[in-house]
């Protein structure tokens, strides 16, 4: 479980909205990454810190794009 961040934490203010889902080869299996999830084939919009966003984008089993408003 991710730790709670203080309002003064710079990472807490630099959040990005991302649409995340697993790649087709994962089938129906769930995936957790960077304290977020579970991610499945259905796209899920999450708010992530810059560090979490980097971890999500680096995972080859996840499709990550900027979420549309």
Image (cartoon, grey):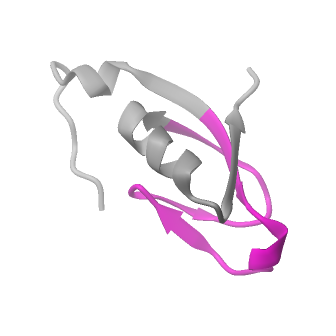
Q: Quadrant of the C terminus?
A: top right
Q: Is residue 47 left or right of residue 66?
A: left
Residue 27, position in %: x, y? 80, 79
Task: Give whichever of 24, 6 is nearer the camera.
Answer: 24
Q: Is residue 47 above or below residue 52?
A: above
Q: Is-magenta flag for residue 36?
A: yes
Q: Nearer the viewer, residue 34 or 37?
A: 34
Look at the image and give the residue range highlighted in magenta. 18-47
- Residue 40: x and y in percent read 71, 66
- Residue at (76%, 24%) from the top-left corner? 68
Q: Is residue 14 magenta?
A: no
Q: Quadrant of residue 17?
A: top right
**Residue 31 shown left or right of residue 1 in the figure:** right
The total of numbered circles placed on residues is 0
Image quarter of the N terminus: bottom left
Residue 61 x, y percent position in the rendering: 66, 65
Residue drawn at 53 percent across, 60 percent down: 37
Determine which quarter of the picture holds residue 2: bottom left
- In depth, the one of 39 and 59 nearer the eye is 59
Q: Residue at x 23, y 20 (%)?
A: 10
Q: Looking at the rendering, which quadrant does residue 7 occupy?
A: top left
Q: Residue at x 84, y 70 (%)?
A: 24
Residue 25 spot, x, y in % from top left: 80, 76
Q: Is residue 63 left or right of residue 35?
A: right
Position of 53 relative to 40 (above/below): above
């Amino acid at each position: 479980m991710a730790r709670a961040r203080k309002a003064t934490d710079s990472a807490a203010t630099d959040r990005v909205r991302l649409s995340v889902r697993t790649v087709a080869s994962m089938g129906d299996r769930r995936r957790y990454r960077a304290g977020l999830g579970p991610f499945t084939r259905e796209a899920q919009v999450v708010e992530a810190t810059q560090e979490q966003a980097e971890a999500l984008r680096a995972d080859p089993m996840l499709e990550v794009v900027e979420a549309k408003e």
